[in-house]
Amino acid sequence: MTEVPNVVVHRDAEVLANAVAARIITRLVDAQSAKGSASLVLTGGSVGIATLAAIAATPARDAVDWRRLDIWWGDERFLPAGDPERNETGAREALLDHVDLDPARVHVMRGPDSGLSAEESADAYAAELRQAARPEDHGPVPGFDVLLLGMGPDSHVASLFPGMPALYDTRPAVAVHGAPKPPPTRISLTLPSIQAVREVWVVAAGAEKAGAVRLALAGSGPVQVPAAGARGRQRTLFLLDRAAAGKIPPGLGRIASP
């Protein structure tokens, strides 16, 4: 697990979304060139969806072989398919419906309309993760090329909220009940799953995130500051706008745009 994240600061949320989109395209193309396929774990939230929309809007998206890409999610709201509050729905509208994906390689977390309970949905996703894992992944989760994470003002990542039982769970994916922001029932990857990923990118914009960013980079414990546990096996990036970076120590972040 990487100990020290790389911090890159962009001017504002719009520039941040476009820059992250460009990074994703480059990373996916590199992965496909090296091993024939690539895998990307998506997040929701305003910046996460804006990033996907930026990918859809750039001609550079055609450099990716979308048929050889696996799409996963770091968390999902336990709502029926097509519900506007689902991360999947936002991702489809912003990007997935606009590129030539192989439907069999889009791995969704199922909602109540599937007939599964939240626990059964989490178990089914964990089984799918285990099936996709390879011996070189050293565990029950694929070593995804990139996992995108947003972050809340309370420092939550995926649907791992401060102090909640899911932070202690070692299964690949879990049901979350009583989330402090609606809807209360969710499915989420756990910290061990996040930490098995090759590269974890935490993307945050806005002054309301600045305190949480500072804590996440200051060596806080992940039970109280979940974003402090968001670390990749090979690389961790905190991709921020200036407002979100406003409370980190001088010199920690690299200014990427004027």
Image (spheres, helix red, strand yellow):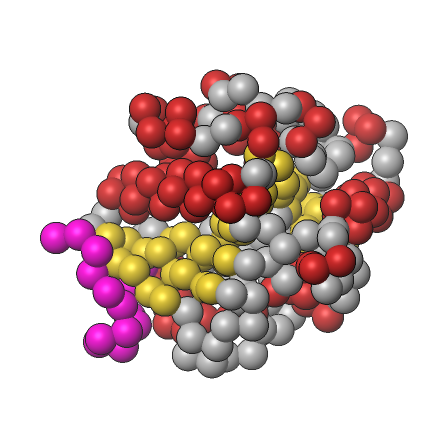
Q: With respect to residue 139, does 23 lie above or below?
A: above
The quadrant the N terminus occupies is bottom right
- Please name whichever residue, 34 or 120, is drawn nearer the observer in this view of the structure: 34
Q: Inspect the magenta stretch and tell me whether residue 252 lies in it.
A: yes
Q: Residue at x 54, y 19 (%)?
A: 100
Main SS of the magenta part reads: loop
Image coordinates of residue 52 in percent, x first then y, are 43, 34
- Please tell me in which quadrant of the rendered image residue 202 appears: bottom left
**Residue 60 in view here:** yes
Image coordinates of residue 115 in percent, x first then y, are 87, 30
Whether residue 157 sits left or right of residue 76 in the image: it is left
Image coordinates of residue 94 in percent, x first then y, are 46, 26
Whether residue 86 sits left or right of residue 112 in the image: it is left
Image coordinates of residue 91 in percent, x first then y, are 52, 31
Q: Residue at x 69, y 35 (%)?
A: 107
Q: With respect to residue 10, does 59 lie above or below?
A: above
Magenta-drawn segment: 242-258
- Please name whichever residue, 129 or 118, is drawn nearer the observer in this view of the structure: 129
